[in-house]
Amino acid sequence: MTKADIVDIISSSVGLTKVETEAVVNGFMETVIDSLKRGDTIELRGFGSFKVVKRAQRVARNPKTNQEVIVPEQYAPVLKVSKDFKESVNEAMMSKN
């Protein structure tokens, strides 16, 4: 599913135009990105929480040459989904089988 697909679904279910809906979706995404850049955590009850985690420096291996490469420490945005979200997806996928 793409952002355009999400905009189509939301606009048809809410009654906003696609242009208005796209502005809201873009605004949401920009807000999340800006908040994470500041180091804030975002909690959306029933969905999950966005936060930034620090990844320590590590040694990796280039699979092509088998040469060791040092990956420097870095910060990465992560989404930890809520328990309800996990259970809902699990139930839906299990019922498909």
Image: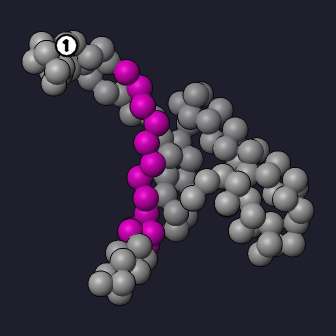
Q: Residue at x 52, y 68 (%)?
A: 46
Q: Residues within 10 Å of mark 1 (few under 14, many from 20)?
A: few
* Res. 54 image quadrant: top left
Residue type (three-letter) at the residue carrying disc 1 = Val
Q: Is residue 15 above or below residue 97?
A: above
Quadrant location of the C terminus in the rendered image: bottom left
Q: Residue at x 88, y 55 (%)?
A: 20
* Secondary structure found at label 1: strand
Q: x, y (%) of residue 72?
A: 30, 14
Q: Is residue 70 above or below residue 29?
A: above
Q: Nearer the viewer, residue 83 or 66?
A: 66
Q: x, y (%) of residue 50?
A: 50, 46
* Res. 33 image quadrant: top right
Quadrant location of the N terminus in the rendered image: bottom right
Tag count: 1
Q: Is residue 13 left or right of residue 15?
A: left
Q: Which residues are magenta?
A: 74-86
Q: x, y (%) of residue 17?
A: 89, 62
Q: Residue at x 80, y 66 (%)?
A: 11
